[in-house]
Amino acid sequence: DTAVSQTPKYLVTQMGNDKSIKCEQNLGHDTMYWYKQDSKKFLKIMFSYNNKELIINETVPNRFSPKSPDKAHLNLHINSLELGDSAVYFCASSQDFAIRAGELFFGEGSRLTVL
Amino acid sequence: DAKTTQPPSMDCAEGRAANLPCNHSTISGNEYVYWYRQIHSQGPQYIIHGLKNNETNEMASLIITEDRKSSTLILPHATLRDTAVYYCIDDAGNMLTFGGGTRLMVKP
């Protein structure tokens, strides 16, 4: 069973569209994250939710809206897509927000291409 | 922004030890050092972390200098499947920011 699963794996869309990426973890973790990996392979945190509550929002345009219906799911909705949004988006989870005490489990990534 | 410095690439012969260095000269006393790796087209995978003592697990060993300004990740017997980008990260503010990493190429 996949611990952290994301769908879709690939997404190609036009500028201006709205799209969503879904993430689910079956590890029983309390904290989930969204990371963005750009073309230079730098991986930066975007959001973190702990028990469905937003705890990190790292200077991300408000076209990006995370939603956590329960602690096993963290979805990412993007409005009015722009060319610069093209990237690989990774979902991750950890047992709790005390990262120092644990490790992050990452999904396989969702490659978004905006044309 | 990443506060660690790693060489952009390294080669290692299969079966030999791979020693990957990392400088984290601005690390604070209570910040851990984490190592992850990313195999092509996959998500990052946790390897090991440490504060000031050396650590070992089934994947690797982590050697941290006494002044904590640098560390070395050791893969004792590298295999072709260890070819990946290896990231050294400090956990400033409970956030993990991944820099460019070291691209390790294990060669037969």
Image (tube, coloured by chain):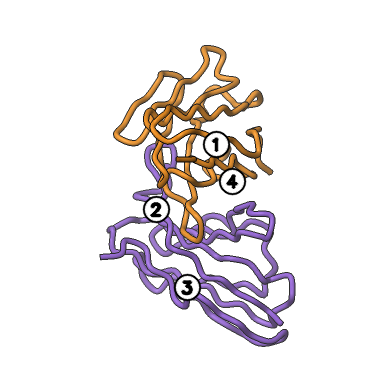
Chain colours: A purple, B orange
The residues tagged by marks 4 and 2 sit, at their Cα atoms, a distance apart of 14 Å
Chain letter of the residue carrying label 4: B
* Element class at badge 2: strand
What residue do we see at 37% from left, 69% from top? A24
Q: Is residue A96 above or below residue A59?
A: above
What residue do we see at 53% from left, 80% from top? A20
Q: Name the quarter where the N terminus of chain A is drawn.
A: bottom left
Q: Which mark is residue B88?
A: 1
Task: Give the percent coordinates (x, y) of residue A102.
Answer: 37, 41
Q: Which residue is mark 4?
A: B98
Q: Which mark is residue A75?
A: 3
Amino acid type indicated by mark 1: Cys
Task: Give the percent coordinates (x, y) of residue B53.
Answer: 41, 18
Chain letter of the residue carrying label 2: A
What residue do we see at 67% from left, 75% from top? A63
What residue do we see at 38% from left, 51% from top? A94
Q: Earlier in the sequence, mark 3 or mark 2?
A: 3
Q: Quadrant of residue B69?
A: top right
Residues at marks 3 and 4 touching, judged by CB atoms closer than 8 Å: no
Amino acid type indicated by mark 3: Asn
Residues at marks 2 and 1 touching, judged by CB atoms closer than 8 Å: no
Task: Give the percent coordinates (x, y) of residue A57.
Answer: 60, 58
| View extreme (top): residue | B66
Q: Which mark is residue A105?
A: 2
Q: Is residue A72 above or below residue B68?
A: below
Residues at marks 4 and 1 touching, judged by CB atoms closer than 8 Å: no
The residues tagged by marks 4 and 1 sit, at their Cα atoms, a distance apart of 7 Å
